[in-house]
Amino acid sequence: MREKLYTKWKGGLNRLCFLLMCFCWTTVQSWAVGEDVHLTIENGKTYEFEAFNSYYLTYVATANGQLSLYQTGGDFCRQYTDNTFETELPSTPQYVNEGKLVEVKVESGKTYYFLTRGLSKGELTVTFGEKATPLELLSLSKEEGTTLNLSIDTLLGFTFNRMVKVGNCTLSSGSVIGNLTASTHDYGFTVSIKDVLYKWLKEGNVKAGDEVVLTVTGLCNANDENDKYNGNGVLTVKYIAGALPAELVSVTNSPEDMNFLSYYLPTDERGVVTLTFNRSMGEDATAKLFYGDIEGSNVYTESLPVKVKDTQLIVDLRGKRRLPSDMLPNASADVWEQYKTISLKVSNVKDVEGNYAMSTSQGTTGSYTFNYTIEVVEFDIARQFTPDEGTSLDDYPTIELWIREDDSFTYEGVDFTYSVNGKPETVFVPISQITKKDSPDGDGVLLTIPVPNKAADENSDVVVSLNNLKAADGADYSEDFTIIYKTSGKSMAGLEIESVSPADGAAIAALEAGSFLELSTNMNDRVGYVWFRIDDQNPKDPDQACVKTMTSMKKETVEGKVSFRTEIIRSVTFFEGHTYKVTFNAYASESDYQHGADALGVMTVTYTGTTPEFKFSPVKFVGITPDPDYTVISDVSQNEFTLTFDGPVVLNHENAFVVYGQGMNYPFESIESNEDGTEWTVKASLEKLMEMGMMPRLSMSFMPVDKDGMLVEGNAGKDATSYLNFAYDCTIGIPDLQVSPESGSKVESLKEIIVGCKDIMDDNGEVIFQGGISESYMAAEKIILYKNGREPVATVTSIEPIIPEDQEDNYFYVPVEMKLTLDTEITDNGNYRLHIPANYFILGTGMSNVNSKETSVLYTIDQPIKITVTPENNSTVESLKEITIECESGIDVPSMGTIQLLNAQNEVVASATGEDCELLLPEGAGPWDPYTGVTIKLDQEVTEKGTYKLVIPEGFFYLGENYENSDEMTFTYSINASGIHSIGTESKGVVVYTVDGKFILKSSDAKDVKNLKKGLYIVNGKKMMVK
């Protein structure tokens, strides 16, 4: 049954005035005042409440039992002693399913009084029963039986009809089981499955598709432990494990590597942020910069393209200036100074299959945020051209340019812009043709720039400028590096071919090795240098159009005839159906060409090819298993490889073999095919190959032919020399690195790790591998420590051989251990992986040494989460009002429970809830950084002398990166009277305090005051200066 309570207004004007008063009063009143409505409520009914009214409710109990008042909108129902509504009884509302629930035990025949008000409409549902409604599960954030996706389903949420208390929580799959921590809130609890399920999937204990069971025990009503869920306090929910999502492996140019420069030159690799994942990534990612007040209007945002390169997402910050004044042009200098951090957020990160990548923190599905400190790029410039502006360049083979701060600029060369027939024409002199050296005074660099040999109008200008000039601060300095010279002008006649061999238009099979290409022009006396290239005019692949790159021709005189000739060193084949163009470029001298002068002329001839094209078999190679890109041969049993084709082929010991190196091949142990010849399995004799010497790579080659003897096209070589080649990383026989602390260890911190390779013995005690370790020149990657498998947190920056004391003078001693030192000591809790790339060390001695294999070492740091409290525990204070709790690894307040300050009689003298707490961010933190402090503000300031105990209930805080529920905390304080203000004189001796109320001295002899340090004190209640 539903009843509606109407409020009647006297005239439209009164109503308008009332609404205006409500808006005006909201800053000084907790609610606006409407009408008082008195109502007797009944079991089983729902009442609608209007906004701004006060509802005085009366309930007459007809039996003993539980009265439940569930309300949406407005304030919760507060209980009073009688119908005067003056004395409020204590009541604790439960926030259930977006509403507020008040439960009261009632006795038959008694009358109960409640009052509720609010600024919004709402409903009140009245329910009575002999017993309270039992604890029920209302909803799950993840439907039972569905698949858990670790990139999305990091937190599972459960909503109940009551506030709950949770005992133990576990996740299990088959025989493996892990403990979880449940975080309770107003109407249920959440539990993070991410770390446990991730570890299982990573280690292979659980596979995608396996059943995963969440079990919660000790689940009961927070206000009634006898009200157990399902009667036994056990909740069981079953899910399906999904596959591991893509993981971030490393970040290049992260905030740990650098500050964010206000401008990056186009060539500055620091301006490219690269996120590398452990699998190929999709095209969905977006990137955005944030600067300023992200919650206000004074904010700058900029969307950036994200380039995908297989496993990498690349964000290019280069080429745009981002000064604080550029990003917030309407702000003042004080505001620019205030915001020193800029954030880069890469969002919607998915792999090629559309699955979100695993993020580094809760609530950030498929996104990563990097907070940089802004660094404004500044420098001073100076430049000087020689000769001076306006000088004629006719007599200058070169000009000079002196530049200070040259390393703050990039440019590709120098442009000389001439006037030719009244139109501008530019000759570009590349940087490769410019000499650059330090100036004699050491204050800059000196560029020597060749002047081009260029035809130009008579008495015209020559404009000289730096080509594609960019400055490190992003400003435009092109005018500063531009100068105008003069020229008297030059003219040039046309250039033509007089003869060429082979003749223009000839049909030929090839320019054979040992033959000559010869050219003569009508200007042989003026031409000093010629180069040519050959291009296919109708190639199958446009990228293969050039069949012979630029080649110089030598100027020769034979029997008085001048020509340009070049010997063909390697045959150039001209295929049937193709036309080939030979382009000749002629210059007055080779120096003119090198300095960017105009060619005297460009000439071309064409040839028609007659060589039939090589034809491959129509059969195509499909694939090989295992895949070389994802397989490491670590055991001699991994010796079978299967090649698949889309048609029958023939393989034998003549066209299939292991490539051993140094021109040596080794036959396969066996080569077998299926019935139709489309699938071939080869078996390598790995044991025998190992006897010949360790192989870091297992390489094999195949030249299959079809039934007609036609060659199947391979992945290497060309035409008749095409072949299939595959190479596998091979670690057979390579010793494992010996590591201390060993993998799997629990440690307090990580700073130094010992790696080594000692002698390896067989069962008879004979040395089969002589120990030794040294750094390898092949070590291209760094040794990096990752947290939780994906977040780089430290890098090895020092590697030192460990030399025993008794071997320090032994020049020939070969170290067997190396000490690795991280660039920072790691103490934060978490799981860590030290990744040592393959080939980083050389193991062994003499000719038997090998490169080390890729190694991962696992560590765990599991220290109690550290907190600090101000004022300190067990300290003496003047009063108690504010207490600050700090936790560097993160702290938050879920608004659960009440903090109490108890006196010596265990009486509550002050309290605080989550709403009385102020969360604190560290200085320089970005908008997504965790809070590291909480200031508790008690509802009463306590100044009375005595001993007090501050009790913070269990679960009041979330602590650390994993948001663990805090244990109960207790801190003890002493208030010494009212500090210095209550010090009275005594008949004997002295009592001394500092001016801020700290007790210093109590003595029967007043002379002891003279022994205090110089300063101002309170002595027997009066200020006194000790000199």
Image (cartoon, rainbow, N blue to C red):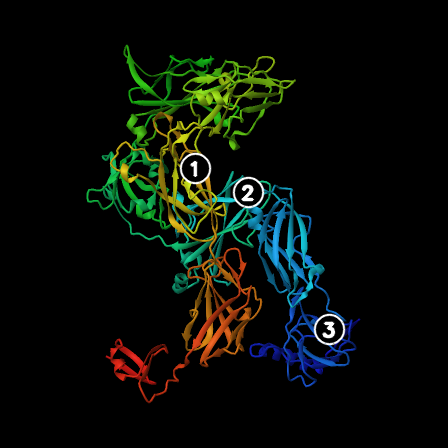
Measured along the vertical axis of the image, is residue 928 above or below residue 1000? Answer: above
Q: Residues within 10 Å of mark 2 (few under 14, many from 20)?
A: some
- Find numbered disc 2 in the image and state the secondary structure of the residue it sits on: helix
Question: How far across and how far down the image is residue 258, in percent?
Answer: 39, 50
Determine which of the numbered discs, if any, sits on residue 67 in the image.
Answer: 3
Instruction: Check disc 3 and give the amino acid type.
Output: Leu
As drawn, is 501 to the left or to the right of 178? left
Q: Residues within 10 Å of mark 1 (few under 14, many from 20)?
A: some
Which of disc 1 and disc 3 is earlier in sequence? 3
Measured along the vertical axis of the image, is residue 345 above or below residue 653? Answer: below
Instruction: Check disc 2 and give the amino acid type.
Output: Lys
Determine which of the numbered discs, if any, sits on residue 202 in the image.
Answer: 2
The image quarter containing residue 671 is top right
Query: What residue is drawn where x is 47% and y is 28%?
Result: 732
Instruction: Check disc 1 and give the amino acid type.
Output: Pro
Q: CA distance from mark 2 to mark 3?
A: 52 Å
Q: Are marks 3 and 1 in contact (CB under 8 Å)?
A: no
